[in-house]
Amino acid sequence: MYNRKKIQEEIPEAVTKIWSCTSDDCNGWMRDNFSFDQTPTCLLCHSPMISGEKMLPLIVNMTDQWKLSAAVTTATAE
Ligand SMILES: [Zn+2]
């Protein structure tokens, strides 16, 4: 039952800043990769978005790479 290791365990997850759609009917969200000057709107339904957090695997685009490598280093040091 629990003796089979999932390969996902090798991928650390981190709380990542995101923007999430305020519409209950929409699951739209985006990574907070950018320095938004104002609240973005959802690409799917054009509702306003609010900043939030989401647990995401540390597989990211190059923009976030330096942040996450720092996070991993910190976690390993502990
Ligand atoms: Zn939406």
Image (spheres, helix red, strand yellow):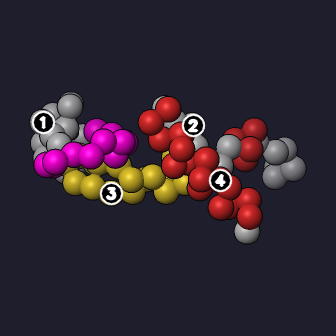
Q: Identify whether 50 is placed above or below 58.
A: below
Query: Are the residues at dot 4 and dot 3 in contact (C-beta closer than 8 Å)?
Result: no
Q: Is residue 64 magenta?
A: no
Instruction: Tell me the amino acid under the disc marked 4.
Output: Val
Disc marking residue 72: 4
Residue 46 tag number: 1
Circle 1 — which element?
A: loop
**Relative depth, front residue between 22 and 40:** 40
Q: Three-letter amino acid code at disc 1?
A: His
Of label 2 and label 1, which has the lower sequence position? 1
| Magenta highlight range | 27-39
Q: Secondary structure at mark 4?
A: helix
Give the Cα separation between the discs numbered 4 and 2.
12 Å
For ligand 1, tell me if the residue under mark 1 lies within 8 Å. Answer: yes
Q: Where is residue 13 drawn, in percent x and y?
A: 59, 51
Based on the picture, tell me whether residue 30 belongs to the magenta stretch: yes
Real-space Cα separation, disc 4 to disc 3, in angstroms: 21 Å
Q: Residues within 10 Å of mark 3 (few under 14, many from 20)?
A: some
**Residue under label 3:** 52
Q: Residue at x 39, y 53 (%)?
A: 17
**Amino acid bearing label 3:** Gly
- Of tags 4 and 3, the one toward the viewer is 4
Q: Is 33 on the left-hand or right-hand side of 72? A: left
Query: In the image shown, does 74 or 41 lie closer to the viewer?
Result: 74
